[in-house]
Image (cartoon, rainbow, N blue to C red):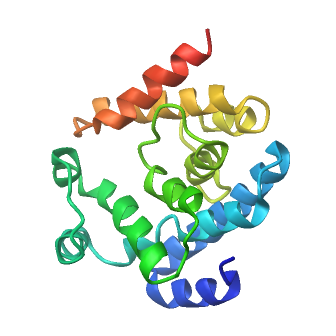
Amino acid sequence: MADLEKIRCELKKQLKKERYIHTIGVMYTAASMAMRYGEDIEKAMTAGLLHDCGKFAPAGEQIRLCKKYGLSLKESEVEMPALIHAKLGAYLAKETYKVCDGEILNAILYHTTGRPDMTMLEKIVFLADYIEPGRKMIPGLSDVRSLAFTNIDRAVCLCSKQTLSYLEKSGRSIDPMTRETFLYYSEQKK
């Protein structure tokens, strides 16, 4: 398994202070959720710790690095560069931080958009990123926090719904995967 202390020290040097604090919050929130749902705690902590490792550079640099590493970008990622760090992060987790576990890499890859039929670890990291204690309070956040520990699929549905609503209201591009995630999990509620 990954050496979490070594990764933590490296990320502390790489990330801005606020991003690093958020990352630690996600790591511990993911660990708490893993305990609740009987998932591997170390995998959850590793994915939570590395989920934003691709955010060490500005968007333009992230795009350049994706080209350098041969990572193809979807049109929605180019239109909304805030999504790129997930793909770059999964690559860096594997190549730089030597994480070989596909489940952890996918949890990093899908932590921003989600996807239909996520694994439990993917759902945990997706939600931990949204609900970690340092997040600025937004409408509905307390509902997602509560659901995250009682009904994880309903929490994913509400989280993706609120993300879609925010993106629509602010006139931002929407990755089709975010919409697919919401549609899939809204069907699961029925």
Q: How many marks?
A: 0
Q: Residue at position x 79%, y 31% from top? A: 150
Quarter of the image for the C terminus: give it.
Answer: top right
Pinpoint residue 35: horizontal percent, then vertical percent.
84, 52
Pinpoint residue 111: horizontal percent, then vertical percent.
49, 51
Pinpoint residue 3: horizontal percent, then vertical percent.
68, 84
Depth order, front residue of 62/115 = 115
Depth order, front residue of 171/87 = 87
Depth order, front residue of 168/4 = 4
Residue 186, visible in the rendered structure? yes
27 relative to 82, above or below: below
Q: Residue at position x 76%, y 49% from top? A: 33
**Extreme residue in the top direction:** 190
Pinpoint residue 23: horizontal percent, then vertical percent.
58, 68
Quarter of the image for the N terminus: give it.
Answer: bottom right
Quarter-wise, where is residue 42 in the image?
bottom right
Quarter-wise, where is residue 167 in the image?
top left
106 relative to 5, above or below: above
Q: Residue at position x 64%, y 70% from top? A: 24
Q: Residue at position x 63%, y 61% from top? A: 26
146 relative to 137, above or below: above
Residue 104 located left or right of residue 174: right
Residue 142 located left or right of residue 104: right
Residue 165, visible in the rendered structure? no
